[in-house]
Image: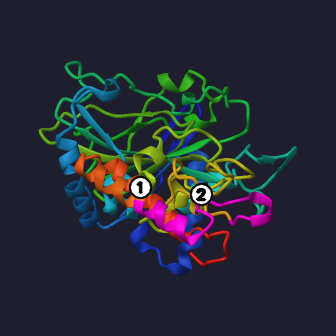
């Protein structure tokens, strides 16, 4: 259905992912990008099997039930994050290939009309080698109960754009800093408050201008397993849940990798958990160096060579694993000779046992890692570790 507003004539385009095979992927991607470029939003139906949604809800249920309503001023609503660490099923959505291809076109390549990649004084299309890196920005279950968004349980956000969270004003930059994604974990209906969208609002001038807030909205109704995607300039907002059941959605956002994340993924999924993830997901949540020296750890190391290695700890000397040049650098973390090595090892083993007896398991684990680093470190007397 087409609607006409101050931004022109628009429609909420719907694409069926279930009908796509490998030969149609490029055509599907072009249609999705065109829909966002023209209208600011697109719905991809049947993007994931509903059983995956049910599995995700089951994994997140203890966290949902233990969370109070009203966070972020959203009445009647529970918001629960850290999905990468808490729900393996969420990984299917976070790394969904069609979504990531669309995000890459919008963020990495800046292919929406009027945008361009700008690197070191040069502007151009997102050709290989001339792209922005992007990363996961936010993961959040949004569980809206009956009456959520009503006068009794009001939504503080109402209609809004999402690009205002950074200190810098991007409206004149010719840039899309983020893409927002809403997965329907349950059916999104008009009655239970499916997301309201203002089509074409991403073309407002200035880009954060007020005109869109007085325009009529369209509700993005969709079945479980479908997904709504829009730009950070597109005006949207949750509807009122007038039904007797809860509406469950999952908000997964992506942003340029040189900007701060809304949800700090490195704390939400710390290294001891991230080490078990696929490399693609590690990099997506921020365990990478997006460019140059950005995001290095301690002794100038990439996250993959430091915090994602099994025994790394910033409080353990020598845990960086850099090779030591004996004549230039002097003694490494290990003692000079085997006798001193055995003495130090025995002292660490005693300290570990003492920490366990004190029930200080964090200290015991650090000492255990220290022993591991010590065993690997070469001695200056030439003996192998």
Q: In the image as oriented, which residue stretches furthest toward the front?
A: 339
State the quadrant of the C terminus. Answer: bottom right
Q: Residues within 10 Å of mark 2 (few under 14, many from 20)?
A: many
Question: In the rendered view, does 46 fall on the left or right side of 243?
Answer: right
In the rendered image, is residue 257 in sight? yes
Asked whether residue 384 is drawn in magenta, I would say no
Q: Residues within 10 Å of mark 1 (few under 14, many from 20)?
A: many
Q: Label 2 belongs to which residue? A: 318
Question: In the rendered view, does 52 fall on the left or right side of 268?
Answer: left
Q: Secondary structure at mark 2?
A: loop
Question: In the rendered view, does 105 fall on the left or right side of 248?
Answer: right
User: Where, by quadrant of the figure, is residue 141 drawn?
Assistant: top left
Question: In the rendered view, does 95 fall on the left or right side of 158?
Answer: right
Vertical order, 150 against 269 (above or below): above
Q: In the image as oriented, which residue stretches furthest toward the top?
A: 151
Report the residue at 29% width, 46% height from top: 360
Residue 14: numbered disc? none
Report the residue at 76% width, 47% height from top: 116
Q: In this view of the protein, which residue sits in the foreground, 48 or 136?
A: 136
Q: Label 1 belongs to which residue? A: 367
Q: Position of residue 221 (x, y in %)?
A: 33, 47
Q: Position of residue 332 (x, y in %)?
A: 65, 61
Please, which colouring scheme is shown?
rainbow
Q: In this view of the protein, which residue sits in the foreground, 230 or 179?
A: 179
Q: Position of residue 42 (x, y in %)?
A: 48, 51
Vertical order, 147 against 269 (above or below): above
Q: In this view of the protein, which residue sits in the foreground, 211 or 368?
A: 368
Q: Position of residue 75 (x, y in %)?
A: 25, 26
In the image, the segment drawn in magenta is 323-346
- Report the label total: 2
Work out whether mark 1 precedes mark 2 in sequence or the reverse, and give the earlier one.
2
Asked whether residue 342 is drawn in magenta, I would say yes
């Amino acid at each position: 259905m087409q609607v006409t507003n101050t931004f022109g004539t628009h429609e909420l385009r719907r694409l069926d992912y279930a009908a796509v095979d490998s030969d149609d992927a490029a055509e599907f991607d072009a249609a999705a990008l065109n829909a966002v470029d023209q209208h600011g939003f697109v719905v991809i139906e049947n993007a994931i099997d509903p059983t995956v949604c049910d599995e995700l809800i089951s994994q997140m249920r203890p966290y949902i039930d233990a969370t109070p309503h009203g966070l972020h001023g959203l009445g009647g609503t529970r918001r629960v994050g850290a999905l990468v660490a808490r729900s393996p099923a969420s990984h299917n959505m976070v790394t969904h290939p069609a979504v990531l291809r669309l995000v890459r076109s919008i963020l990495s390549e800046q292919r929406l009309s009027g945008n361009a990649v700008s690197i070191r004084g040069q502007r151009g299309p997102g050709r290989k080698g001339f792209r922005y890196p992007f990363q996961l920005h936010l993961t959040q279950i949004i569980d809206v109960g009956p009456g959520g968004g009503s006068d009794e349980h009001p939504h503080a956000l109402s209609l809004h754009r999402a690009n205002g969270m950074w200190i810098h004003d991007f409206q004149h930059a010719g840039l899309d800093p983020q893409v927002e994604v809403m997965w329907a974990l349950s059916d999104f209906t008009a009655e239970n408050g499916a997301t309201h969208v203002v089509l074409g609002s991403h073309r407002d001038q200035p880009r954060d201008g007020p005109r869109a807030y007085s325009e009529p909205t369209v509700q993005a109704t969709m079945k479980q397993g479908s997904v709504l995607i829009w730009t950070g300039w597109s005006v949207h907002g949750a509807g009122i849940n007038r039904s007797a059941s809860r509406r469950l959605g999952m908000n997964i956002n992506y942003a340029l990798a040189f900007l701060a994340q809304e949800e700090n993924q490195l704390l939400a999924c710390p290294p001891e958990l991230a080490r078990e993830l696929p490399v693609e997901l590690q990099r997506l949540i921020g365990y990478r160096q997006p460019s140059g020296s950005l995001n290095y750890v301690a002794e100038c190391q990439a996250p993959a060579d430091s915090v994602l290695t099994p025994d790394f700890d910033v409080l353990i000397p020598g845990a960086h694993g850099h090779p030591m040049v004996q004549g230039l650098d002097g003694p490494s973390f290990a003692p000079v000779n085997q006798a001193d090595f055995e003495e130090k090892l025995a002292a660490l083993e005693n300290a570990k046992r003492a920490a366990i007896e004190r029930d200080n398991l964090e200290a015991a684990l650090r000492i255990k890692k220290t022993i591991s680093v010590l065993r690997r470190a070469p001695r200056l007397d030439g003996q192998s570790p």
